[in-house]
Image (cartoon, rainbow, N blue to C red):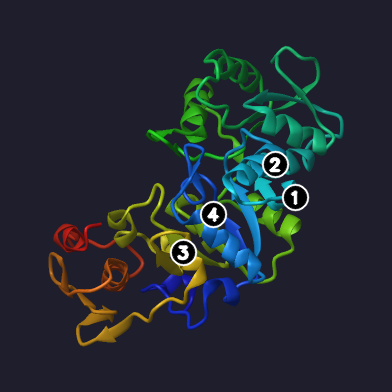
Amino acid sequence: MTRQSRTSPAPSERSLHQAYDTALLDLDGVVYAGGQAIAHAVESLAAARADGMHLAYVTNNALRTPEAVARHLGELGVPTEPAEVITSAQAVARLIAEQVAAGSKVLVIGGEGLRVALRERGLVPVDSAEEEGLAAVVQGYGGPDLAWGRFAEASYAINRGVPWYASNTDLTIPGARGIAPGNGAAVEVVRIATGAEPQVAGKPLPPMHRETVLRTGAKRPLVVGDRLDTDIEGAFNGEVDSLLVLTGVTDAKQLVRAEPRHRPTYVDRDLRGLLTGQPEVAADGAGFRCGGWTALALDEVLELRGDGDPIDGLRALCAAAWTAAGDGVCAQDAEKALVRLGL
C-alpha cells in the first residue's frame, strides 16, 4: 500500500520502539503542554530509550534554543542532550545561509532560538529594518509577549524588497490553558501588511525533514506527533511512517476526516503507543473490524457496532471513513459513532 492510497491505520506485530530505530518526536502536545509533562510521556520515553530506541525532539517552535529545550526536558525527567533537539529555527537558518553570503545581516522577528541558529550558520542577527546591507527577514514564534511593533519592523523591510523567511506557519500552539495563536497567525499579520509570501522551513515542508535527517542520521525513523497538518503531513512528504497521539491539537473527528496526506500510519492515545504493537484493522463484510468493534460507512453516516477499547473503535472508523473517501475527505457523519467511543 502506498502512502498516497492509505485507507486504514497499519498493523505492527512488533512494538513500535523495536520496529523503528529513531523516534522523531514533536514536543508541544506530545511530550508536554504548557511546560508540564503530558501523562505517561516521561515513563514511556524512558522505557523506549532503555530498550535501544534513539529519541530526537523535533519542534516547529523556534522560540527556545536546543540547550533550553534539553534543559526543560531534563527537568521533566527526560534526560536529553542539546544535539537531540532539532528546531525550525535551525532549519530556517540553514535555508537562509544557502541563499545569502556568510556574515550577512538578518532581521529577527522572534526569540533567542532564531538568533542562536543564525549565528551557528555564520549570519548576524539584527533588530532594525534600517540596518545597512540587510539580506533577509526571518520570523519565528516569539512568545505571547512579542511586541506588535516587531511586525511593523518586518513589514518595513519586506516592502522594500528584502527576502522574507518564516520558521513555520503553525496557526496555533497548545498551552496549559488551551490553544493559542502560533507563529502562523503572526505570519498572516505580516502577509496582510506586505502582500508578500515567505519561504517556510518548518514542518511539514522538506527543509525541516532534511534538517532532522542530517542531525540525527536516522535510518528507519518514526515521526510522532499530535498535528495532522505539520507532523503527519511532514512524515508523508518525507516518505516515512508516523504515529499520531491524541494528546494535543488533533481530535478524533479531525482524524476520521483526514485527507490522504494527513493520514498517519498508526494511531494511539499517548506515548504509551511507542511501547506496543498495533492491532490489525481487517475488512469484515461491508465494514472494517478492529478489536471488538466493526465500523461501516453507510450512505450518510459512519456506523459503529460492538464494544471494547475506544482506540480500536477509532481505528476501525478511520478505515471505514478513509476507504469511503478515497483521495478526498469522508462525507459521512461520524458524530454518533464518536460519541459511543467517548472521543
Residue that carries the numbered disc 4 in the rendered image: 42
* Mark 3 closeness class: few <14, some 14–19, many ≥20 residues within 10 Å: some
- Mark 3 and mark 4 lie on one chain; the one further toward the N terminus is 4
Mark 4 Cα shell of 10 Å, populated few (<14), some (14-19), many (≥20)? some
Dot 3 corresponds to which residue? 272
Task: Kindly give the residue lying farthest to the bottom in the view shown.
Answer: 285
Whichever of labels 3 and 2 marks the residue nearer the N terminus, that label is 2
Q: Residues within 10 Å of mark 1 (few under 14, many from 20)?
A: few
Is 229 located above or below residue 313 in the figure? above
Of tags 3 and 2, which is closer to the observer? Answer: 3
Q: Is residue 201 visible?
A: no
Quarter of the view holding residue 48 = bottom right
Q: Quadrant of residue 257?
A: bottom left
Pointer 2 residue: 66
Image point (48%, 60%), residue name: 271
Relative depth, front residue between 53 and 299:
53
Q: Give me the C-alpha separation between circle 3 and circle 2.
A: 25 Å
The local secondary structure at tag 4 comes to helix
